[in-house]
Image (cartoon, helix red, strand yellow):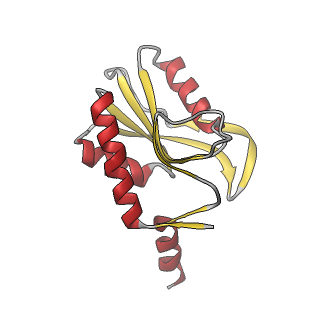
């Protein structure tokens, strides 16, 4: 298990923000709830992007992978073109592929790029912007801190 600290996170946000800024004229960020929320908030601040939306998907129950992917709460992207879809990790890639499919089906005019802090080499989809390869289970600082608060 690998602990991912706040300090590492801040470094990675800055690296990814610079990459995005230099190569993608971003109109909006779509955060995959819940994993992508912390990352997308920091990224939107670093990139000064106010068009920040979320989308929900359920593909895991705790650590168990489900057989279907449920995508819901699709944001209105009628007035944007360049969209960055953000998550904390690309594991199998199946969820991101399904989210991209749903968004492009509803908004065929948009161009989608993907950002994730971590990716797994075996994933079906590689993020356009990423910082680290996940070689083991990642324990994100935000999950650890919330677990501590819940135990008090």
Q: Nearer the viewer, residue 50 or 137?
A: 137
Residue plotted at (32% across, 23% down)? 80
Where is residue 82, by image quadrant?
top left
Q: Residue at x 54, y 28 (%)?
A: 100
Task: Please indicate whether residue 52 sits to the left or right of residue 111 in the image.
Answer: left
Question: Residue 88: x and y, percent?
Answer: 50, 50
**Residue sitting at the far bottom:** 152
Identify the residue shown where x is 35% and y is 20%: 81
Q: Is residue 26 visible?
A: no
- Residue 30 coordinates in the image, percent (x, y): 41, 37
Residue 97 left/right relative to 8: right
Q: How many marks?
A: 0
Q: Quadrant of the N terminus?
A: bottom right
Residue drawn at x 39%, y 66% is: 6
Residue 129, visible in the rendered structure:
yes
The percent position of residue 31, horizontal first and vertical second, equals: 44, 42
To which quarter of the image does residue 70 belong?
top right
Residue sitting nearer the eye, 36 or 126 = 126
Name the residue at the top extreme.
109
Seen from this angle, which residue lies furthest left? 48
Q: Position of residue 12 (x, y in %)?
A: 38, 53
In the displayed structure, 107 sits above or below 118; it is: above
Q: Nearer the viewer, residue 127 or 37?
A: 127
């Amino acid at each position: 298990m690998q602990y991912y600290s706040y300090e590492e996170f801040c470094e990675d946000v800055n690296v990814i923000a610079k990459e995005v800024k230099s190569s993608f004229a971003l109109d909006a960020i779509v955060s995959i709830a819940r994993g992508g929320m912390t990352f997308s908030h920091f990224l939107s601040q670093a990139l000064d992007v106010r068009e920040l939306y979320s989308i929900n998907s359920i593909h895991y129950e705790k650590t168990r992978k489900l057989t279907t992917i449920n995508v819901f709460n699709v944001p209105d992207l009628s007035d944007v073109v360049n969209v960055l879809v953000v998550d904390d990790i690309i594991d199998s890639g199946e969820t991101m592929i399904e989210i991209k499919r749903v968004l492009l089906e509803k908004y065929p005019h948009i161009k989608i790029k993907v950002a994730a802090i971590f990716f797994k080499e075996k994933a079906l989809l590689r993020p356009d912007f990423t910082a680290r390869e996940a070689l083991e289970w990642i324990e994100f600082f935000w999950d650890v801190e919330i677990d501590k608060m819940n135990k008090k």
